């Protein structure tokens, strides 16, 4: 999977669906087969551009049935999706239905007391709830009621799913876009009732898809919720693995904890058929490169591609981008890093053991380097692979408990000797003899 922060991917020349379509060959060259787009519908932040508080992110939607005018037309969007399909790339649409923008017509009318929209949002007396200073500052009179919203998202009022009108409206949105794309990444999935997600799954499963007959549902649930796999979502944010990789990358946890955090869904009571999305970056977090350094980034990315699950690359991760939502560094990007990510994708595609092989820890001896920064595990399928990860600086010399081939499966470079000693800079994927 590859995530695009839509209005930053083209660069500073201005993004449109047509310009995104022109860059599909890059995505095909990289080897990805699933593309997640941040929201493309008409929104407040997109309309404000760089003046918006958190950038032109698109998560404050004002019209769920039309694309953002600055990106082009509905026909332009469908042309882009068709170009992705021609390249063998599935398209995930960011479904944002926990909340709307305050500029959404339903919210504005609910705020004014129009009975038809009174139940679309939940209003509470200010005597009973906390009212943020931002809401008080913008009010010209005394604030008597306030709408439900999460955290400091004061511009994002929560929809009320006790309202049948809201449910019907959102299901209409699902129908509108499910015929065009191949799946939904469900924003703030944890804020929407489980029962409604079951309705969505029933609506799209085997009924909607422009590509291959299946429709994918990916949840953003932080922290993980075992109920999300019960006739709801097909794929889940692996937040435990994400935070574990950060802690290991910063040196706050030993590298040997990697498999513990990778397998922690079982501890949380999550089903065995749980499909985790493995990631080190996304549009809501600081870049791993900026926080942990380039060496640790190479190692962490290798981990996401060599463990079970679906690895996700956030745009610019492969080019060394250090700012979370900055313009893609097409010209000045890290070419060596991009080639390595491409090689990881090619290796995973051609190596079944990395997709569905069994995982087991491998005891290794660190002959030179910091043992707390080194870990290893095996993948067993039609062949046996040993993955050695080094999160530290420089190189580590590691003695493995079994004989391995000399060359790294990903890079083709020699790293091991006949006596099963490997010299690892960041990571090595080796075939057992």
Image (cartoon, rainbow, N blue to C red):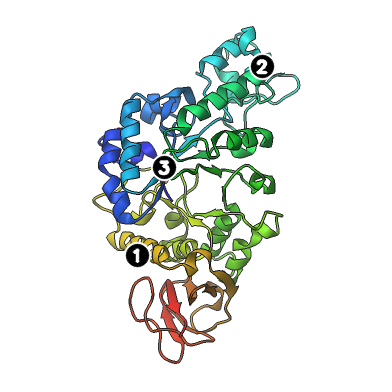
| Residue at image mark 2 | 119
Mark sitting on residue 343: 1
Measured in 3D between alpha carbons, the distance from the residue under mark 1 to the one under mark 3, in whole angstroms, is 26 Å
Extreme residue toward the bottom, this view: 419
* Sequence-first disc among 3 and 2: 2
Extreme residue toward the right, this view: 128
Which corner quadrant of the image does residue 220 belong to? top right
Q: In this orientation, which residue lies closer to the viewer: 11 or 95?
A: 95
Which corner quadrant of the image does residue 242 belong to? bottom right
| Left or right: residue 136 compared with residue 13 | right
| For the residues bearing labels 1 and 2, Cβ distance under 8 angstroms | no
Measured in 3D between alpha carbons, the distance from the residue under mark 1 to the one under mark 2, in whole angstroms, is 52 Å
Secondary structure type for disc 1: helix
Circle 2 residues within 10 Å: few <14, some 14–19, many ≥20: many
Q: x, y percentage for residue 255? A: 56, 70
Secondary structure type for disc 2: helix
Q: Is residue 101 visible?
A: yes
Query: Image point 40% across, 88% down: which residue?
Result: 417
Q: x, y percentage for residue 48? A: 39, 25
Q: x, y percentage for residue 59? A: 48, 31
Considering only vertical position in the picture, is 409 above or below 207? below
Q: x, y percentage for residue 395? A: 42, 77
Query: Image point 55% across, 82% down: which residue?
Result: 364
Circle 3 residues within 10 Å: few <14, some 14–19, many ≥20: some
Mark sitting on residue 48: none
| Left or right: residue 281 compared with residue 190 | left
Secondary structure type for disc 3: loop
* Sequence-first disc among 1 and 2: 2
Measured in 3D between alpha carbons, the distance from the residue under mark 3 to the one under mark 2, in whole angstroms, is 37 Å
Circle 1 residues within 10 Å: few <14, some 14–19, many ≥20: some
| For the residues bearing labels 3 and 2, Cβ distance under 8 angstroms | no
Q: How many marks?
A: 3
């Amino acid at each position: 999977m590859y995530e695009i922060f839509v209005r930053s991917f083209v660069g500073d020349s201005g993004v449109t669906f047509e310009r995104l379509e022109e860059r599909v060959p890059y995505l095909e060259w990289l080897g990805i087969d699933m593309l997640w787009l941040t929201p493309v519908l008409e929104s407040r932040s997109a309309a404000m551009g760089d003046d918006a508080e958190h950038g032109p992110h698109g998560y404050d939607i004002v019209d769920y049935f039309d694309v953002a005018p600055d990106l082009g037309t509905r026909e332009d969007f469908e042309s882009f999706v068709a170009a992705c399909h021609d390249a063998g790339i599935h398209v995930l649409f960011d479904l944002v239905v926990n909340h709307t923008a305050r500029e959404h017509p339903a919210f504005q009318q609910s705020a004014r007391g129009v009975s038809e929209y009174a139940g679309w949002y939940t209003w509470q007396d200010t005597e009973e709830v906390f009212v943020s200073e931002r809401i008080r500052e913008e009010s010209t009179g005394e604030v008597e009621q306030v709408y439900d919203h999460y955290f400091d998202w004061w511009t994002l009022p929560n929809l009320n799913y006790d309202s049948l009108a809201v449910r019907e409206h959102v299901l209409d949105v699902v129908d509108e876009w499910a015929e065009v794309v191949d799946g939904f990444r469900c924003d703030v999935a944890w804020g929407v009732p489980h029962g409604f997600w079951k309705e969505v799954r029933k609506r799209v499963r085997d009924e909607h898809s422009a590509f291959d007959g299946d429709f994918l549902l990916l949840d953003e649930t932080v922290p993980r919720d075992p109920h999300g796999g019960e006739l709801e979502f097909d794929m889940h944010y692996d937040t435990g693995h994400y935070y574990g990789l950060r802690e290991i990358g910063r040196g706050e946890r030993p590298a040997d904890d990697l498999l513990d955090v990778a397998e922690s869904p079982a501890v949380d009571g999550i089903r065995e058929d749980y499909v985790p999305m493995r990631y080190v970056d996304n549009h809501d977090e600081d870049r791993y490169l900026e926080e942990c350094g380039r060496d640790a980034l190479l190692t962490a990315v290798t981990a996401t591609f060599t463990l079970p699950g679906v690895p996700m690359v956030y745009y610019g991760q492969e080019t060394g981008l250090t700012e979370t939502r900055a313009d893609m560094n097409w010209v000045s990007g890290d070419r060596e890093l991009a080639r390595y990510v491409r090689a990881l994708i090619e290796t995973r595609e051609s190596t079944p053991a990395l997709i569905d092989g069994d995982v087991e820890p491998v005891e290794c001896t660190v002959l030179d380097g910091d043992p707390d920064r080194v870990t290893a595990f095996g993948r067993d399928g039609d062949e046996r692979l040993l993955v050695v990860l080094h999160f530290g600086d420089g190189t580590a010399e590691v003695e493995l408990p079994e004989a391995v081939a000399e060359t790294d499966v990903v890079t083709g470079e020699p790293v091991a000797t006949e006596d099963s000693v490997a010299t690892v800079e960041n990571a090595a994927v080796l075939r057992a003899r």
